[in-house]
Every structure is written in C-alpha cells, then in structure tokens.
Image (spheres, grey):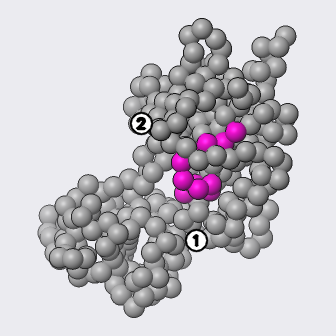
C-alpha cells in the first residue's frame, strides 16, 4: 500500500509528487497517456515565474517530470476507472482498466480537463482530417492554407497567433462581440495582418468530402449565414473536467470536484488539484500550487493518523 497515489501527471500531479516525496511519502503517479498534460500542446508559455523569456510547453513539463523522477517519484501507465473509500479501513482503492486495483492511504486526483467540442455536424467526421484541437500539433500541416480558429479566450488567441507561422490566413471566429482573453493577447491578435476576426458569429457546420473544405457561419445578431472556404478548423472553446470515473456526490453542477481551499474533498484522505477542481483558474502556476497544497494536506492527514 502506498502513502500517496496521484492520478494524473500534469502540472498539478507532478508538483504534488515533488512535494509528497520530499515530505517522505511513498508516492506513485498513475498517468493515462504521457506525463505533461495539456501544457504539452502549448507552443510557448509566457507567464510561468522564473523564465525571463517564453518557454515551450513541452520543455516546461519535461523539466517538471525530470525533477520528479530525480527525486525518486515512480510514474506508471494506467487508466483509472474508479476511486472508492474502503468501508472497513481508512484506505482508498483505485480501480484500473484491465489491471489489479491499487490501494493508498491518500489519493490526489489531478486528471485535468479535456478539450470541449462544438457539437456541430462535421466535427466528429473530420477530426484528424482538418478539424484539430491542437495548433502546436497540427499547425504545420496547413502551411500556405486558410484556417478557422473558434474561440475567444487565452488559448484561442494564443493558438490563432501561433498558426500565422504556417497559414496564409487565420479567421478567428468568436460568438461574442469581444474577446475574453488577456489584453496583451488581444492586442497581439488585432495587430496581426494575417488574422481576420469574425465576431458575434458561430460555426453551424463543418463541411467537406474527404477532408474539410469550409465552414458554415451564422451571425448571432442578424441570423445571416455564409459559407467560408477553409481547409482547417481549430477549436478552443473551453474544457470539460475528466471526472467520468468519479461518484456524482464529489462533483458540482459543472462536474468539477468540490474542494475547500486546502484541496480537501468530502472524503477524508482524498484531494483534488488543478483544472479538475472547483474554482480553478486553469493556469499552470495555480495548478502547481494546488498540487503542492494537496500533497502537504495529505502529509498532515497521514501524520494525524499516527498520533
């Protein structure tokens, strides 16, 4: 049995592991894919403290992973399907798809969130054939082509600007009359001659035959529709917490895990950190702080059991 099992190896999970193992806890991270989380898909990070110049998302997360491994954190692959408190003991049991369950005295859930879909005709059919949720991953495939970016937050603005390295024209489509992203990002986008903003507008459908050939746009104020010929559609309209394996009693109406300011859930010994928890601002530095807080709470909880 482990002192602490951390589910997820993004910024929150890796930070939790670093703090946990330095506190003397026997730690294990379970990660479904590869360590790093969504930050691995971010081109450049400009607001992480300690880096004078922007740092690549891949580089930042690789450094966190290397730090955790150097300290002795074990990272294993696994798909978690359940987390339950044992009725006859104080431990928690983690169910794994196709594997034996694992048991720990404390658990930190840090499985983050997934890209939100538009849910329009053509989106599912053309995913991987013109529809993408990662400009860093797929931008180079659209060199010299026209693309659409859907969204108005920080990520959409950042990725729209990144795509100008490859695309001949980037149409930035947003459903409101103003962007929600940081002013510095708005200024950068509005000053870029390769970006055309399309406000008060939604994508009604994504069209094509074998691959994307255009999108149908609808103005929310006038109701007017028009076809815009593009070869790529990049969607950045928010996130959905990865909480499908958890009991509803732990979640709020947005399916985020309910926690207090110290990352405690309703179950003693169970914590949540990062984008998955209620009130998250979905920033890397805040996810790291969440992870550190959760690990210190786990240490305090285990210490109290020994008194």
Q: Is residue 30 magenta?
A: yes
- Find residue 81 and report its horizontal and vertical position in percent: 47, 34
The residue where tag 1 is placed is 43
Q: What range of the chain is rendered magenta?
A: 28-38
Mark 1 and 2 residues: CB-CB less than 8 Å, in contact?
no
The residue where tag 2 is placed is 244
- Find residue 150 and report its horizontal and vertical position in percent: 36, 66
- Find residue 289 and report its horizontal and vertical position in percent: 71, 43
Instruction: Locate residue 144: give its quadrant.
Output: bottom left
**For the point 22% across and 69% down, which residue is it?**
206
- Find residue 122 and report its horizontal and vertical position in percent: 21, 65
Specify whether 253 is left or right of 165: left
Point out the residue furthest to the left here.
Answer: 224
Quick one: SS at disc 1? loop
* In front of the other: 298 or 193: 298
Instruction: Locate residue 304: give its quadrant.
Output: top right
Q: Is residue 173 magenta?
A: no
Point out the residue furthest to the top here.
Answer: 88
Specify whether 245 is left or right of 41: left
**For the point 70% across and 62% down, which residue is it?**
62
């Amino acid at each position: 049995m482990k002192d602490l099992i951390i589910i997820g190896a993004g910024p929150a999970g890796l930070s939790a592991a670093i703090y946990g193992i330095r506190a003397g806890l026997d730690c294990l991270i379970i990660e479904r894919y590869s360590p790093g989380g969504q930050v691995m898909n971010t081109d450049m990070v400009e607001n992480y403290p300690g880096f004078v110049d922007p740092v690549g998302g891949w580089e930042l997360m690789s450094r966190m992973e290397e730090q955790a491994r150097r300290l002795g954190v074990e990272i294993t692959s696994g798909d978690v399907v359940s987390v339950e408190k044992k009725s006859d003991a104080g431990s928690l049991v983690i169910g794994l798809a196709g594997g034996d369950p694992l048991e720990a005295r404390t658990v930190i859930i840090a499985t983050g969130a997934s890209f939100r879909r538009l849910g329009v005709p053509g989106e599912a059919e053309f995913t991987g054939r013109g529809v993408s949720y990662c400009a860093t991953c797929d931008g180079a495939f659209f060199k010299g082509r026209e693309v659409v970016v859907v969204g108005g937050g920080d990520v959409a603005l950042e990725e729209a600007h990144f795509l100008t390295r490859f695309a001949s024209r980037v149409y930035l489509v947003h459903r409101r009359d103003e962007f929600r992203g940081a002013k510095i990002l708005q200024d950068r986008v509005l000053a870029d001659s390769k970006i055309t903003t399309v406000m008060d507008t939604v994508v009604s459908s994504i069209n094509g035959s074998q691959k994307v050939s255009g999108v149908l746009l609808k103005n929310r104020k006038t109701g007017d529709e028009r076809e815009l010929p593009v070869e790529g559609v990049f969607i950045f309209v928010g996130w959905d917490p990865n909480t499908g394996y958890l009991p509803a009693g732990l979640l709020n109406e947005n399916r985020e895990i309910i926690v207090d300011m110290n990352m405690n859930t309703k179950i003693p010994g169970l914590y949540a950190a990062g984008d998955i928890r209620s009130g998250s601002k979905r920033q890397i530095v805040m996810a790291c702080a969440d992870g550190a807080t959760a690990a210190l709470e786990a240490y305090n909880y285990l210490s109290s059991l020994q008194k």
